């Protein structure tokens, strides 16, 4: 099946260049120039990947990501002319899967696209071939992870977790009691080809602790193992 990619870029020459090169790689491409149209296109074509510029007229890339993450789960590769860490962190916090700073080479761009799509395919294939769990619900006292509904509840209250926070918690939960290094977490949750550093893991652990720990300054569920990584106690 041909994979569909939605390119959202307001700079006409770059938008056309990206679309042309993606089509040459065999992808089905739709290219648009502003955030509002991007939302309409994403809902209509249900793409396998969105290449999304941050600086857009109308709704910017952050707004588009925020809205789409409430409606669907699909990979997003963000583009920006800025090289500021705050943009990278905000983009990742909202649920972007990868991040590229302009200018970039077309070879690197195509490699990133291929890597993100490959990672998504592997995750889906693993989910399809994995033996059904004894129970869809993982329970750790008052913390419950409902895998079938993609939901997390604490004391019977649903938690609003961002996509990567959920993925991270689920990875921890499936490896309860094991010491997990930052590099392993980064590889398994974000993918081996993710361009960000291990600080990304620390940032997301901090956000996750603020939502599931009784006292995030003294965590008992996600414990730091000095010099080694993290261990999930449940």
Image (spheres, grey):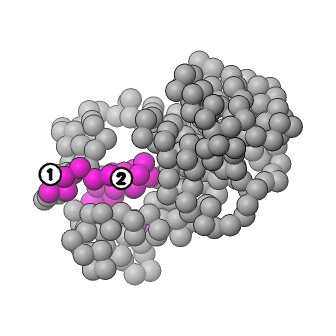
At x 72% / y 35%, what residue is drawn? 33
Vertical placement of residue 188 versus 109, above or below: below
Q: Is residue 75 above or below residue 22?
A: below
Question: Is any atom of residue 193 visible in this view?
Answer: no
* Mark 1 element type: loop
Tell which of 192 and 14 is nearer to you. 14
Magenta stretch encompasses residue 178: yes
Residue topped by disc 2: 161
Asked which secondary structure carries label 2, the reply is loop
Q: Residue furthest right?
A: 13
At 68% from the left and 67% from the top, the residue drawn is 84
Measured in 3D between alpha carbons, the distance from the residue under mark 2 to the one under mark 1, in whole angstroms, is 15 Å
Q: Position of residue 207 (x, y in %)?
A: 39, 65
Q: Which residue is mark 1?
A: 156
Magenta residues span 153-181
Which residue sits at x=25%, y=68%?
213
């Amino acid at each position: 099946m041909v994979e569909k990619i939605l390119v959202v870029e307001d700079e006409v020459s770059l938008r056309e260049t990206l679309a042309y090169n993606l089509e040459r790689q065999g992808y089905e491409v739709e290219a648009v120039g502003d955030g509002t149209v991007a939302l309409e296109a994403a809902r209509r074509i249900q793409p396998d990947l969105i290449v999304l510029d941050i600086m857009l007229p109308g709704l910017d890339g952050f707004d588009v990501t925020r809205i789409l993450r409430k409606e669907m789960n699909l990979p997003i590769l963000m583009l920006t002319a800025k090289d500021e860490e705050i943009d990278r962190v905000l983009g990742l916090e909202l649920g972007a899967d990868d991040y590229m700073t302009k200018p970039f080479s077309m070879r690197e761009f195509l490699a990133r696209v291929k890597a993100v799509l490959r990672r998504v395919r592997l995750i889906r294939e693993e989910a399809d071939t994995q033996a059904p769990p004894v129970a869809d619900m993982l329970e750790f006292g008052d913390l419950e992870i409902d895998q079938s509904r993609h939901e997390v509840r604490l004391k019977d209250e649903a938690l609003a977790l961002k996509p990567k926070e959920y993925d991270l918690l689920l990875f921890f939960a499936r490896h309860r009691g094991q010491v997990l290094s930052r590099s392993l977490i980064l590889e398994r949750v974000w993918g081996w080809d993710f361009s960000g550093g291990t600080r990304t893991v620390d940032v997301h652990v901090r956000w996750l602790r603020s939502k599931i720990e009784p006292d995030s300054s003294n965590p008992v569920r996600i414990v730091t193992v000095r010099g080694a990584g993290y261990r999930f106690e449940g």
